[in-house]
């Protein structure tokens, strides 16, 4: 005799939505979130409610992830063009009547104040993956040129704000989609070689290139100063070089095992600037040392590898390209943040994923995770 359930329990209603989630991905993100809460408790102990707010932001990101994970990749593809068009339109609105703060015009008021460039972190990979999916099997050089234009427009508008950090993240995510779509190595190697030569020339001729009064083309003055400060932080140790110098001191003072939770002197004597946001890696390094850094880097490597694995196993070209772009977003966030704090990259406003304080970035990361979970679930449905 069949069993009839008149009123299913809450778990029975939720169970179908929870099936198919990628366990290893969920585990590594949970570990990173726990690490983020732990160091935020220490670094943000005198920053009011930052620890509580950080936990709240994580819960909001988890909700965003859950909702997006229910949307199949086919439905995400239909959102690509409208979301991209909306993002570009909002970037143009920023240029025309945006809100300026600290010398940058990055926000626009549409009833609520938003930063449209955050939308493009997802919209650009989405529209590029959609474009290549539409051209699958018949790709020509012109198709890559169109993809380059789709990428160049938002990147140029974001750089105009100016926002070098976000423009680099959008550029990296977009280029990864174009590369994974089959861009020839003959087109990839020349700009890489030119970039390495440019870096070599900068290092070799740093005193004359960075001399007072010398101005570079393309880059704004503050961007030029960031590069010159990276090459020689001691040029202005109490000004432009202060962030990099204090970050390196904190990382070095952590030693092998660190000073222990709540014991970081550079952190708690407030030598580290932005210690709960962009420079939280310096606070973490001081308190957990080289051993803690290796664990954290290992977690990020696992996160990126797992995202790439999901990309390789995805059932469609659109899903593969989108998952690959998300993997590049995670890599770019972590590499750029750790690099700038360690003094090997210029200081730009890029948070450390799941570790740094910031609601907008956390929601963006939740959206990326939701996309990965959606693709992983679609793979399992195809296999079954």
Image (spheres, rainbow, N blue to C red):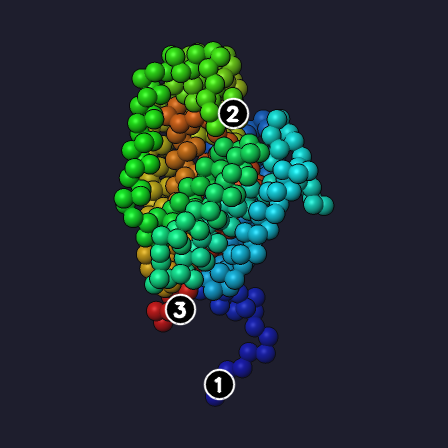
Residue 50, image x, y percentages: 58, 34
Q: Which residue is mark 1?
A: 2
x 44%, y 18%: residue: 229
| Label 3 secondary element | helix
Q: Is residue 117 visible?
A: yes
How much space separates mark 1 and mark 3, taking CA atoms? 27 Å
| Circle 2 crowding by C-alpha within 10 Å: few under 14, some 14–19, many from 20 | few
**Residue 376, quarter of picture:** bottom left
Residue 130, image x, y percentages: 45, 58
x 46%, y 15%: residue: 214
Of badges 1 and 3, the one in the foreground is: 3
| Circle 1 crowding by C-alpha within 10 Å: few under 14, some 14–19, many from 20 | few
Left or right of 356, for residue 289: left
x 30%, y 37%: residue: 190
Count up the numbered dots: 3
Q: Earlier in the sequence, mark 1 or mark 3?
A: 1
Of badges 1 and 2, the one in the foreground is: 2
Q: Is residue 117 above or below residue 44?
A: below
x 55%, y 42%: residue: 117
Residue 7, image x, y percentages: 59, 75
Q: Which mark is residue 220?
A: 2
| Circle 3 crowding by C-alpha within 10 Å: few under 14, some 14–19, many from 20 | few
């Amino acid at each position: 005799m069949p069993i009839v359930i008149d009123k299913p329990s809450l778990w029975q209603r939720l169970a179908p939505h929870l099936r198919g989630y990628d366990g290893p991905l969920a585990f590594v993100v949970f570990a990173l979130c726990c690490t983020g809460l732990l160091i935020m408790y220490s670094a943000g102990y005198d920053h009011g409610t930052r620890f509580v707010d950080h936990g709240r932001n994580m819960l909001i990101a988890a909700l965003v992830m859950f909702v997006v994970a229910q949307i199949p990749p086919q439905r995400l593809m239909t959102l690509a063009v409208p979301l991209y068009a909306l993002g570009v339109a909002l970037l143009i609105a920023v240029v025309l009547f945006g809100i300026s703060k600290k010398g940058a015009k990055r926000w626009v008021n549409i009833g609520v104040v938003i930063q449209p460039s955050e939308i493009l972190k997802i919209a650009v990979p989405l529209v590029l993956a959609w474009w290549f999916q539409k051209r699958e099997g018949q790709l020509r050089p012109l198709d890559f040129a169109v993809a380059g234009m789709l990428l160049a427009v938002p990147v140029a508008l974001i750089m105009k704000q100016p926002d070098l950090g976000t423009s680099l993240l959008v550029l990296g995510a977009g280029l990864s989609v174009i590369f994974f779509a089959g861009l020839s190595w003959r087109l990839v190697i020349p700009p890489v070689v030119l970039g390495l030569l440019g870096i070599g020339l900068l290092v070799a001729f740093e005193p004359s290139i960075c001399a007072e009064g010398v101005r570079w083309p393309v880059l704004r003055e503050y961007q030029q100063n960031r590069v010159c400060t990276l090459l020689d932080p001691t040029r202005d140790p109490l000004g432009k070089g202060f962030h990099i110098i204090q970050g390196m001191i904190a990382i070095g003072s952590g030693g092998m095992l660190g000073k222990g939770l709540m014991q970081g002197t550079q952190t708690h004597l407030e030598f580290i600037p932005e210690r709960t946001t962009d420079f939280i890696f310096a606070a973490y390094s001081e308190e957990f040392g080289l051993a803690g850094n290796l664990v954290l880097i290992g977690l990020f490597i696992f996160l990126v590898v797992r995202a790439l694995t999901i990309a390789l196993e995805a059932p469609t070209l659109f899903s593969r390209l989108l998952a690959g772009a998300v993997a590049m977003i995670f890599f770019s966030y972590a590499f750029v943040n750790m690099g700038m704090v360690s003094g090997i990259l210029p200081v730009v406003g890029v948070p450390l994923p799941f570790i740094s304080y910031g609601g907008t970035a956390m929601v963006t990361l939740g959206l990326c995770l939701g996309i990965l979970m959606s693709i992983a679930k679609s793979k399992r449905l195809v296999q079954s």
